[in-house]
Image (cartoon, grey):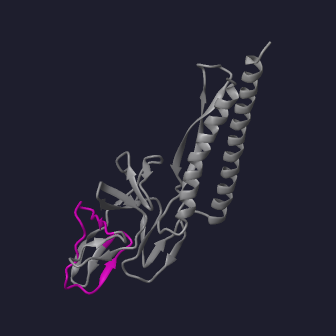
Amino acid sequence: MSDGIYVAAAGAVAQSNALDVTANNVANASTTGFRGSRVTFAEALARARSPDVALVGGITPAVDLQPGAIATTGSPLDVALEGDGYFAVDAPGGVRYTRAGAFQLDAEGTLRTATGMAVRSADGGPLQVPPEATQIFIGEDGAVSTELGPVGSLALATFAPGTLQHEGGSLFSATAAPTAGPPPRVVRGALEGSNVNVVRGVVDLVKVSRTYESLLRMIQGFHDVESRAARDLGGPK
């Protein structure tokens, strides 16, 4: 069988994966604190067949670290981060990280994300606001207080590039421990938007889709050639 069909098939699989990543970016263009993924392709030499044949290896999605735009909301529980860093939260699978600072209080006074995860404090526990408190203040350093006094501080973490993985929406898991460095500045009464450019995302979707379709046509073309060759060679002499 021709090496070309293997090259085209490997490319089609890679483009299909790229299509999934790009579609997810576009779908989250309005998600608070979302950071899109960039797709890179690896080259894998098919040495078992020929040292001159190169196949596209698996794609490696990397988190786009460009910040989203910060918009003022005026809500005292909405916070955004200026600079590199993430809020730590308690998810069902353990500690996770997010840039989405649309926080709220539950009936027990626990500070939670919009999806219900408890926001972690710098000492490792959840942030609890006294039920009798009526005003909440969040400082630029992440310190949380009420008119009754200090409550705690938001747990903020920074990471080396390539150590965060998307877990859906604006949530990330870490493959390495946080790094030392200056913490980000907390902006009170504001939220960070998605860093996905919708127009660029749609253009990428069209481009990847067309590339995928072209590779499928190539695969069909190689298949047709192989089928004709088999019929001609296997026919009566």
Q: Quadrant of residue 204?
A: bottom right
Q: Position of residue 223 (x, y in %)?
A: 70, 32
Q: Is residue 39 above or below residue 32?
A: above
In this rendering, position of residue 53 left or right of residue 24: right
Q: How many marks?
A: 0
Q: Quadrant of the N terminus?
A: top right
Q: Quadrant of the C terminus?
A: top right
In this rendering, position of residue 43 left or right of residue 63: right
Residue 195: tell me if it is visible. Answer: no
Residue shown at 22% from the left, 63% from the top: 125
Residue shown at 75% from the left, 29% from the top: 225
Q: Is residue 103 above or below residue 98?
A: below
Q: Is residue 88 magenta?
A: no
Residue range highlighted in magenta: 116-143
Q: Position of residue 53 (x, y in %)?
A: 67, 25
Residue furthest top in the image: 237
Q: Position of residue 134 (x, y in %)?
A: 26, 87
Residue shown at 70% from the left, 37% from the top: 220
In this view of the protein, which residue sits in the foreground, 189 or 206? Answer: 206
In this rendering, position of residue 128 left or right of residue 178: left
Residue 129: tell me if it is visible. Answer: yes
In this view of the protein, which residue sits in the foreground, 231 or 225? Answer: 231
Q: Quadrant of residue 108?
A: bottom left
The dominant secondary structure in magenta is loop
Residue furthest right in the image: 237
Q: Is residue 122 magenta?
A: yes
Residue shown at 55% from the left, 52% from the top: 20
Q: Position of residue 141 (x, y in %)?
A: 36, 69
Q: Quadrant of residue 128?
A: bottom left
